[in-house]
Image (cartoon, rainbow, N blue to C red):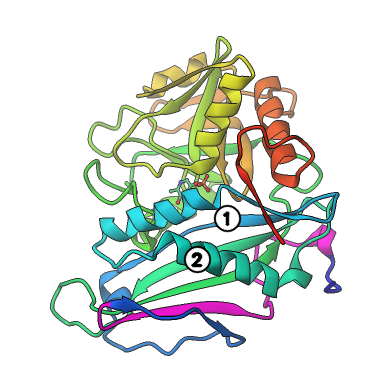
Amino acid sequence: MENLDWKNLSFGYIKTDYNIRCFYKDGKWGELIVSDSEYIDIHIAATALHYGQEAFEGLKAYMGKDGRIRLFRWEENARRLAYSAEGIKMEAFPVEKFREAVFRIVQLNRRFIPPYGTGATLYIRPLLLGSGAEVGVRPSAEYVFIVFVTPVGPYFKGGIRPVDMLICRDYDRAAPKGTGTFKVGGNYAASLRAGMDAKEKGYASTIFLDAKEKKYIDECGPANFFGIRDNTYVTPKSESILKSITNMSLIELAQNLGIKTERRQIPVEELAEFSEAGACGTAAVISPIGKIFDPERNITYEYCRDGNPGPVTLKLYNKLTAIQFGDADDEFGWISVVE
Ligand SMILES: *Cc1c(COP(=O)(O)O)cnc(C)c1O
């Protein structure tokens, strides 16, 4: 095993041994190619570089107490990458090839999988980009699929902690019939001004509102939003948010734990009705929200007044992470073991 300071890993990039690439050319995907270089050669007129034809995914490999390596719902990531590809007119990467690439990259970089008990994981980053030369605005005829990994620390060192968020009305991330439901780099470029603005003001992240009416909650930068009221898990229904696999999973867990669930529009004022709120995604699983500030109305919505996450948030977080690390039974069939 690699000699890294596993307990103090950040959510950054650390070089590992190998990555995998696959090229689409002349109307077909080639073989997976294992590389130890961190660079790719790309045409200066590649559509990814000037027209943003790029999509990505994010998932993790978890080391269990039993020494087995687990992946969480990788098929959902494979399917979502194909959905994103179609959304920006790229050639989809076949699900079976995705499986092969992801399993292989984990096996090849086995020594970088953080030990059980550190809370750290091996983050897996697949990406797909248009690599063919075009100057006119049209989809590329050539694509590259890449998957690399990097060990990442637990998002919250020493247990989950509430973070504060800022409601954003000055910028939009995605329009209702735009690209918000696709996991594409362009949405992230579009979110940077809002994200930096929130950070400069001392908030962990932005909460975007729906771009059209600015009445409803959309999502929290790179994570979905949920609120808890009257033993109900409520999460936004919107045409401009990414369908988080973590959120889908929390909904199933909640139902299984006897918590009601609703996916519907959430008006900003409803923030006053929630007893708990959180942001969810693969990176942090759940970031409990301590406070949300609405600058226009000059209102602060407060949750977790004692500095701890609320009971429903904690229950969901503990259950989901227990399944991911293999401490709880995989009763939903979400886990694949990498041999
Ligand atoms: C990736 C992502 C999420 C979280 O999705 P998960 O599948 O749970 O990791 C949420 N919002 C946006 C905008 C994202 O890109």
Q: Foreground residue, 123 or 332?
A: 332
Kindly indicate whether the residue at mark 2 contacts the one at mark 1 (C-beta within 8 angstroms): yes
Identify the secondary structure beneath mark 1: strand
Instruction: Name the amino acid, label 2.
Output: Pro
Choose top left, top right, bottom left or bottom right for residue 123: bottom right
Q: In the image, which disc is placed on residue 145?
A: none
> How far from the left and from the top, in percent, is residue 286?
62, 38
> How far from the left and from the top, in percent, is residue 158?
81, 44
Choose top left, top right, bottom left or bottom right for residue 38: bottom right
326, above or below 260, in the image:
below
298 sits left or right of 339 in the view: left
60 sits left or right of 62 in the view: left
Q: Check residue 14 for magenta coloring.
A: yes
State how far apart marks 1 and 2 are (Cα).
Answer: 9 Å
141, above or below 204, in the image:
below
Count numbered badges in the picture.
2
Say which residue label 2 marks: 126
Quadrant showing the C terminus: bottom right
Q: Foreground residue, 308 or 246?
A: 246
Instruction: Name the amino acid, label 1.
Output: Leu
Where are the magenta residues, as a range?
6-27
Say which residue label 1 marks: 59
214 sits left or right of 116 in the view: left
Quadrant showing the N terminus: bottom right
Q: Earlier in the sequence, mark 1 or mark 2?
A: 1
Q: Residue at x 47, y 86 (%)?
A: 40
Identify the secondary structure beneath mark 2: strand
* Mark 1: C-beta under 8 Å from nearest atom of ligand 1: yes
* Mark 2: C-beta under 8 Å from nearest atom of ligand 1: no
> How far from the left and from the top, in percent, is residue 280?
56, 39
